[in-house]
Image (tube, rainbow, N blue to C red):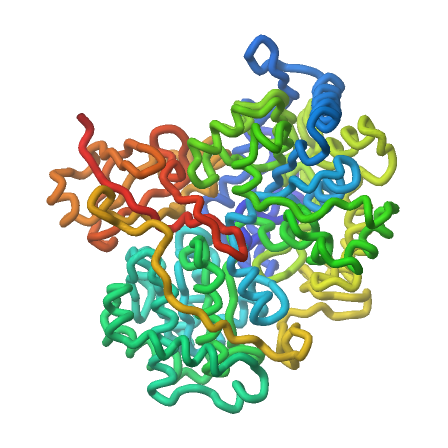
Amino acid sequence: MSDAATDTHCPYCALQCGMGLRRTDDGAAPVEVVERPGFPVNLGALCGKGANAAAVLAPGTRLTTPLVRRDGELRPAGWDEALDRIAAAVTATAGAHGRDAVGVFGGGGLTNEKAYLLGKFARVVLRTSAIDYNGRFCMSSAAAAGVKAFGLDRGLPFPVEDIPRTGCVILVGANPAETMPPFVRYLRELRENGGTLIVVDPRRTRTAELADLHLAPRPGGDLALALGLLHLVIADGRTDEAFIAGRTTGWPQARAAAMAHWPEHVESVTGVPVPQLREAVRLFCEAERAMVLTARGPEQHAKGVDTVGAWIDLCLATGNAGRPYAGYGCLTGQGNGQGGREHGQKADQLPGYRKLDDPAARAHVAAVWGVHPDTLPAPGRSAYELLDSLGGEVRALLVAGSNPVVSAPRSAHVTERLRSLDFLAVSDVVLSETAALADVVLPVTQWAEETGTMTNLEGRVILRRKAVDAPDGVRSDLDVLHGLAARLGHGEGFPTEPEKVFDELRRASAGGVADYSGISYSRIAAEDGVFWPCPDPGHPGTPRLFLDRFATPDGRARFAAVQHRPAAEEPDAEYPVRLTTGRVLAHYQSGAQTRRVAALTAAAPTPFVELHPRLADRLGIQEDEPVVVVSRRGRTVTPARLTTAIRPDTVFMPFHWPGEGNANVHTNPALDPTSRMPEFKVCAVRLEKPE
């Protein structure tokens, strides 16, 4: 065993906790995780997922050779054969059906370098518009609302260290005690400093247990709740008129919209009692400074952009934006959910958070890439729309680091679409459920085996460092893109060295909203990360946004004049119960990696459906008995877990498992008209006992 540890970061959530990796020779995983107490975000603390991250690298757990489908079975193959088969399929598909018949589906866990090069590959080599990524399912609604209100989307416009220094936090639809446990120290410090915590969640989660006030709206009620709170702020004379006049636009329209949501009406819609609404307003407005933080709960809806806009309105109306220790922020979910949507794997974007339909943006990026702007494709379909088109308009698909068989809404339908493809290739660390359907599977490096940058939920660009060589037969995604580009006639422009890719990304992002041009590997290492925008090497980075002006053309924040509307699918006589979904402490996203870690599967071995004892009594359901959950889209069977921590009109399922326990069989692909976010967080179901 070597005593020296390599400083790096956790492979999981957007907190991107610092950790050390030390080589071992005990025959299990090639490295072990050790604390890295000097990194400011987590100060050495890790959750169980991070502490056990190295287990995925153990022999027999991860892929170590390419696989190709022969006679209906996936069989080991060499790299040349695998890449040749992909290149031939891409060429044949584009020749027969057009360039847009070849699709690319990326992932929010890819490094900035991989996401950047994947987008370049799609637009320069494939010249297809059919590219999007699973981050669309993460925080696209918050991103769109942030752009509308502030002119810029960065999950948190301030570092996490600011949170304990505010006076009140409203945490909406977030459960960091299970999804990113090291973050909870900031909530505890907030309360230790005399601040208050309000948690909005239909379940009394581990996070809600920490709160001074817990509001439990019906799933789908977050928009009405935010408007009801704003109504009370106005009615009680608690608005900050000087801030509204000096730094915002659109207040008269937003004010009128909020006044249509009087407290008793909001109680009837949300189930939150009027006294609790009034107490929330009192706590929020009596604090000298306050914050609203949202996560997937209010965002994963067909009205997610409007919902986040209403919560932003609450901040703007009370002057809690554009000043220290106050404001709106979003808790990004995926490891590189922030950076992954900034540099070109999203359907409508180019590097630097540029818009693909902006002629100036196209000209700038095309110059960096050495192509004519007219050769770049137009914006394409959003993630679900891309998946829904498989086997029709899109006939061949390349997937990088995503598992839509488990993670996509209406997942049984998406699985059918994947099966209908003429050709499917998947790059991943493990044989995920999606990879198992592929014609070619490419084994790629995991975080400990590669160097690259990530951008965490604060907008802090950090550096993962290679700690150990990958097994023989494993290559990086950059190698994959280089090899495919060469086979498709582009021998130059796709380097395999991460720092070279990052240097090109810096040039491509220069002058954009997410400007990384002043960030370098050496700066990141020296400064424990650099906050974007950072437009030149002498710039200090921007930990806190909007202190002088917002990023809109006139420098003012924009109110959103929005109205509550029902969920896309409300309960009825046939499907009388609301289903909501989420994560559990031991697992991450589709579970493709965490379900392969013994310590984590021991903690959470199976899926379940959580329901209130009153609902269980009415249906004759006992603890741990199998329960059939039926929706308009499918059927699952999972054990019952009875708890008074959930509303009696709502059930909860975690989404980490495939097969009979796959919660996303039920989730509704109704899309937000702006963000194209599916409505993961509420749909109508009924519960039955198995026959």
Instruction: Indicate left or right for 349 with 220 as reference.
Output: right
Whether 86 is drawn above or below 247: the answer is above
Q: Residue at x 69, y 28 (%)?
A: 97
Whether 621 is drawn above or below 179: the answer is above
Q: Residue at x 56, y 71 (%)?
A: 149
| Residue 458 location, quadrant | bottom right
- Which residue occupies the foreground of this view, 121 or 59? 121
Residue 42 shows in this picture = yes
- Look at the image and tell me in which quarter the N terminus lies: top right
Residue 81 at x, y = what percent?
A: 73, 17
Task: Please state the total of marks drawn on the protein image.
Answer: 0
Whether 684 is drawn above or below 263: the answer is above
Q: Residue at x 67, y 32 (%)?
A: 102
- Which residue occupies the foreground of this view, 359 or 425? 359
Whether 434 is drawn above or below 345: the answer is above
Instruction: Indicate left or right for 616 with 29 as reference.
Output: left
Q: Residue at x 47, y 79 (%)?
A: 253
Residue 534 at x, y = what percent?
A: 74, 66
Residue 23 shows in this picture = no
Residue 178 at x, y = what percent?
A: 40, 51
